[in-house]
Image (tube, grey):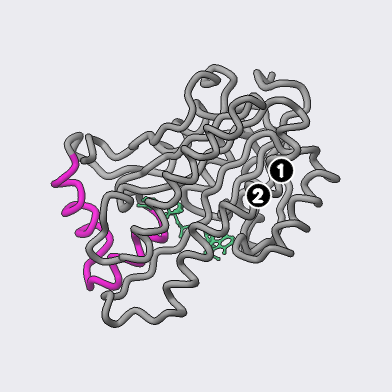
């Protein structure tokens, strides 16, 4: 039984693995048909099968979120197959490391392209359907790196940009019954943090142990921590919460 308005459908980007996969599974359990969007359609199979095993409805859709044409085609396919999107989770992101003085312009453009231009393109394609329905939820994955990231000025800049994006959306779209909120995760176990451990020459267990030492609740996050928050922000119950940044980081962030 879904508690969403009749005909609601969700899009989750970067949902083949990690946080996006957990969010997609959770929204499907909440009763939404979910479009599982990622770079490669075959990579979406694990998430789609997990949703179907749980009794939900899912569709694998390939798209690079930084590519305008691919995004337009992907959203059109979601509309014709699952129905118009009313919940969008902008989750796809990349976070390679490079010192500022060694960072190529190409890396800067790629990181900003996926992490900031991507949410703009997908949101622009999805929001007209929400406006038509008079109801919608845009949830965007920022990061505690928005407050500064010593290892990734490109990533920190994009994640801070997403907070301005979210607040601006909230101001512009509220009158259409659409809320916009950002989630700012702290350290979450995923392939992204696994890759960071490799780059630092640490085992993933050691990397997690060290990260947990600076987290007030004494542990690192798991994708389901983020999925619970996304589930709440997507729900009709969160209709009076908009333009917020919800830190899911095991403690406060300055
Ligand atoms: P992840 O494990 O690396 O998963 C990200 C997913 O996004 C992958 O499936 C990836 O596909 C996909 N993706 C990458 N570029 C894409 C593009 N251009 N178009 C469509 N899909 C694309 O990352 P995660 O840790 O789950 O992170 C999810 C989000 O949370 C990101 O926005 C990240 O910045 C944010 N976040 C994560 C953490 C953390 O500690 N993990 C903390 C704060 C914020 P491929 O694998 O094929 O590249």
Quadrant including the N terminus: top right
- Residue at far right of view: 80
**Residue at x-position 42% and y-position 52%:** 161
Most foreground residue, 65 or 250 = 65
Badge 2: how crowded within 10 Å, few (<14), some, or many (20+)? many
Q: Quadrant of residue 53?
A: top right
The residue identified by callout 1 is 58
Q: Is mark 2 within 8 Å of ligand 1?
A: no
As helix, strand or loop, the secondary structure at mark 2 comes to: strand
Write down the region rendered in magenta: 190-215
Asked whether 170 or 231 is in front, the reply is: 170
Residue for badge 2: 36
Q: Horizontal and vertical percent for residue 30?
A: 61, 27
Q: Is residue 216 left or right of residue 87?
A: left
Residue 246 x %, y %: 38, 34
Question: The C terminus appears in which quarter of the rendering?
Answer: top left
Q: Disc 1 or 2, which lies upstream in sequence?
A: 2
* Magenta region includes residue 201: yes
Report, in whole angstroms, how far the alpha carbon at label 1 lies from the one at label 2. Answer: 7 Å
Q: Position of residue 214 (x, y in %)?
A: 15, 46
Find out whether the residues at labels 1 and 2 contact each other: C-beta distance under 8 Å.
yes
Q: Answer left or right for 57 relative to 146.
A: right
Label drawn at residue 248:
none
Based on the picture, tell me whether residue 172 belongs to the magenta stretch.
no
The residue positioned 63% from the left and 64% from the top of the image is: 64
Residue at (34, 37) in percent of width and height: 248
* 5 lies above or below 41: above
Indicate left or right for 209 with 192 as reference.
left
Q: Position of residue 74 (x, y in %)?
A: 74, 55
- Label 1 beta carbon within 8 A of ligand 1: no
């Amino acid at each position: 039984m879904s508690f969403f308005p009749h005909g609601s459908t969700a899009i989750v980007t970067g949902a083949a693995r990690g946080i996006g996969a957990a969010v997609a599974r959770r929204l499907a359990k909440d009763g939404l048909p979910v479009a599982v969007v990622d770079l490669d359609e075959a990579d979406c199979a694990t998430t789609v099968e997990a949703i179907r095993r749980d009794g939900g409805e899912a569709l694998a859709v390939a798209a690079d979120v930084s590519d305008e044409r691919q995004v337009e085609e992907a959203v059109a396919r979601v509309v014709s197959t699952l129905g118009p999107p009313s919940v969008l989770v902008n989750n796809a992101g990349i976070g390679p490391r490079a010192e500022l003085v060694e960072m190529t312009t190409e890396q800067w453009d790629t990181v900003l392209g996926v992490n900031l231009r991507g949410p703009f393109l997908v949101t622009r394609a999805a929001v007209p359907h929400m406006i038509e329905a008079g109801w919608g939820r845009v949830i965007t994955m920022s990061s505690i790196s928005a407050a500064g990231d010593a290892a990734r000025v490109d990533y920190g800049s994009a994640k801070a940009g997403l907070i301005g994006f979210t607040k601006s959306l909230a101001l512009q779209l509220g009158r259409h019954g659409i809320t916009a909120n950002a989630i700012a995760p702290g350290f979450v176990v995923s392939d992204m943090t696994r890759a960071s451990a490799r780059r630092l020459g640490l085992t993933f267990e050691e990397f997690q142990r060290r990260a947990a030492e600076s987290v007030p609740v004494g542990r690192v996050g798991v994708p389901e921590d983020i999925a619970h928050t996304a589930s709440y922000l997507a729900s009709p119950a969160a209709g009076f919460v908009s333009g917020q940044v919800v830190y899911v980081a095991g403690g406060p962030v300055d």
